[in-house]
Image (spheres, rainbow, N blue to C red):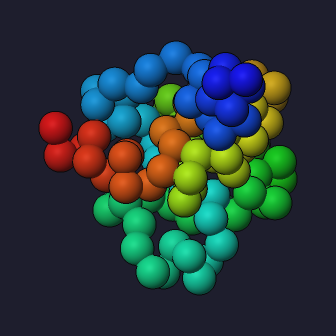
Amino acid sequence: MLNFLKALFGFGGPAITPEQVRSGTIIDVRSPGEFASGHVKGARNIPLQDIPQAALKLRQLPQPIITCCASGRRSGIAASQLQAKGIDALNGGPWQRVRDMLQQ
């Protein structure tokens, strides 16, 4: 059950390092309103529903693509969608976690 919940919320995959966060591109998949209320400095806002259409553009950005959101659920879905298109994408989980990794 615990593994299922970890996978559901995006924490069952490989651990992300601060180096990956610093060298990649951070994509916040929350709504524009959520993004406006606080986000990782330098992150780009692409809501989850727009990720499939943005894949071609994201392929051109520095990788890995680090996805983040409020809890890790939406960012896990986004990372999986990008991986299915052959993009090096990792689920960063909650945006505050990604922000904190940048400060390490």
The residue depicted at 63 percent of the width and 29 percent of the height is 6
The residue depicted at 52 percent of the width and 43 percent of the height is 93
| Quarter of the N terminus within the rendering | top right
Relative side of 2 to 16, left or right: right
Task: Tell which residue pokes out farthest to the top in this image.
Answer: 14
Using the rendered image of the protein, determine whether residue 34 is visible from the camera's viewpoint: yes
Relative side of 23 to 53, left or right: left
25 in relation to 85, above or below: below
| Quarter of the C terminus within the rendering | top left
Q: Position of residue 44 (x, y in %)?
A: 51, 60
Q: Nearer the viewer, residue 9 or 80?
A: 9
Q: Nearer the viewer, residue 65 or 11?
A: 11
Task: Identify the image quadrant of residue 82.
Answer: top right
The residue depicted at 69 percent of the width and 63 percent of the height is 47
Q: Position of residue 68 (x, y in %)?
A: 53, 49
Task: Identify the image quadrant of residue 49.
Answer: bottom right
Relative side of 101 to 75, left or right: left
Q: How many marks?
A: 0
The residue depicted at 41 percent of the width and 66 percent of the height is 39
Q: Position of residue 30 (x, y in %)?
A: 62, 65
41 in relation to 38, above or below: above
Task: Tell which residue pokes out farthest to the left in this image.
Answer: 104
Relative side of 34 to 43, left or right: right
Using the rendered image of the protein, determine whether residue 89 is visible from the camera's viewpoint: no
